[in-house]
Image: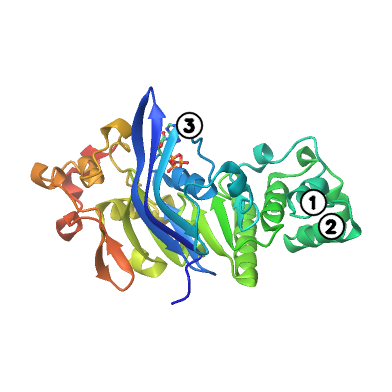
């Protein structure tokens, strides 16, 4: 079998908070093939960015313990020094964040910032200038010559995001990590940027780790979906399978709470409660079940294995609560927050 582009096994992350290590990720297993778009979804605080930052080596080693294995093209990343990480961050892995303005240097012209991202010794050659213009062209910027001479503040949000994508692509990375890449943009611009990411991904056969809370974006972009809750993967499946046959109570709740899926006259389902604080996470349990008020305590408190159970073709679920999970529509109104 061909080597995986990204292969993360048993990745756990602990943050030192008030002198004590607290676990934010527990034994996460995720892999991405070349050309595959994996969407990582879950509510705010579920651990999506913590995972992405582990892949990019962006955690502060003095306050964070990262264990397990993360291999990129077969090379282990966990345990690398900052200098070693530099050899692939921005090179084999490109990054697109939610807020391009805070990622771009306000004092540097766009063209120089793109050139700066390239792994070439002399950034001032004609070849580099041509490549900068080519990249701006690739991300759909017309009049690239003029834009290359501008500063970030002169551009619209959508244009800035295109520039971020050009920077992410500067070294033709194998993997692109896109953390909420369109959240800050207007809906029409969102669609353009998503199309652009998809087009680039197909052209370059790059793998994408797409972090989003927007299920519409997932449906549009993803091949595979991993659902994260309280620092654990609770369900993984191909995108159609996950949308059509969700199993885990959390996945089913997320889909039910999807604002884009509400029909006129219907009220939007709100998942009761919130993601627990790190110190309250007992990862031997299926932590979402605490938020299902009608479940029996014995179900909520039962210990659950770390390994996901295979329930279909490429479809995996954590725990067994899904087997008897039903929405309690009678009390649902009372349970809403
Ligand atoms: N540097 C840090 N120090 C302490 N706790 C942190 C740190 N970074 C993240 N956490 C905690 O880890 C948990 C997971 O956070 P994370 O940002 O990964 O979630 P997320 O799913 O990406 O959320 P969002 O969608 O809001 O970005 C949260 O409880 C968060 O408070």
Around disc 1, counting alpha carbons within 10 Å, would you say few (fewer than 14), some (14 to 19), or many (20 or more)? many
Residue 188 or residue 289, whichever sits in front: 289
> For the residues marked 2 and 1, what is the alpha-carbon distance in whole angstroms?
7 Å
Residue nearest the viewer, comparing 269 with 13: 13
Q: Can residue 330 be seen in this view?
A: yes
Residue under pointer 3:
62
**Secondary structure of the residue carrying numbered label 2:** helix
Q: Is mark 3 within 8 Å of ligand 1?
A: no
Tell whether label 1 touches label 2 (CB within 8 Å): yes
Q: Can residue 185 be seen in this view?
A: no
| Residue 111 percent across, percent down from the top left | 82, 49
Residue highlighted by disc 2 = 128
Dot 3, how many residues are within 10 Å of its Cα: few (below 14), some (14-19), or many (20+)? few
Q: Residue 328: x and y, percent?
A: 18, 49
Residue at numbered disc 1: 115
Q: Is mark 1 within 8 Å of ligand 1?
A: no
Q: Distance between the residues labelled 2 and 3?
A: 37 Å
Label pair 2/3, CB-CB below 8 angstroms = no
Q: Position of residue 244 (x, y in %)?
A: 33, 67
Residue at 48 percent across and 46 percent down: it is 79
Disc nearer the start of the sequence (2/3): 3
Left/right placement of residue 233 relative to residue 49 reads left
Q: Which label's residue is closer to the chain start, 2 or 1?
A: 1
């Amino acid at each position: 079998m061909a080597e995986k582009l990204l292969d993360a096994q048993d990745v756990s992350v602990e943050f030192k908070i008030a002198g004590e290590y607290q676990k934010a990720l527990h034994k996460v297993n995720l892999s991405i093939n070349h050309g595959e778009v994996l969407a990582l979804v879950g509510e705010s605080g579920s651990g999506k960015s913590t995972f992405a930052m582990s892949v990019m080596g962006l955690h502060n080693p003095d306050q964070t313990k990262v264990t397990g294995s993360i291999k990129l093209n077969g090379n282990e990343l966990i345990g690398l020094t900052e200098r070693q990480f530099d050899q692939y961050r921005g090179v084999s892995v490109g990054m697109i964040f939610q807020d391009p303005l805070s990622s771009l240097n306000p004092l540097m012209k766009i063209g120089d910032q793109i050139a700066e991202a390239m792994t070439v010794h002399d950034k001032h050659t004609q070849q580099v200038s041509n490549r900068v213009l080519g990249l701006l062209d690739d991300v759909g910027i017309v009049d690239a010559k003029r834009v290359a001479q501008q500063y970030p503040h002169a551009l619209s949000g959508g244009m800035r995001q295109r520039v971020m994508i050009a920077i992410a692509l500067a070294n033709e990375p194998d993997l692109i990590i896109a953390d909420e890449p369109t959240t800050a943009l207007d809906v029409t611009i969102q669609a353009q940027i998503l199309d652009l990411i998809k087009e680039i991904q197909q052209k370059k056969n790059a793998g994408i780790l797409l972090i989003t809370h927007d299920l519409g974006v997932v449906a549009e972009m993803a091949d595979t979906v991993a659902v994260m809750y309280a620092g654990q993967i609770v369900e993984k499946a191909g995108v159609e399978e996950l949308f059509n046959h969700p199993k885990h109570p959390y996945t089913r709740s997320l889909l039910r709470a999807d604002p884009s899926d509400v029909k006129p006259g219907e009220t939007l389902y709100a998942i009761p409660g919130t993601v627990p604080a790190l110190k309250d996470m007992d990862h031997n349990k299926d932590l979402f079940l605490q938020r299902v008020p009608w479940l029996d305590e014995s179900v909520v408190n039962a210990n659950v294995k770390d390994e996901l159970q295979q329930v279909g073709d490429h479809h995996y679920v954590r725990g067994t609560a899904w087997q008897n999970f039903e929405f309690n529509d009678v009390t649902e109104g009372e349970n809403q927050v």
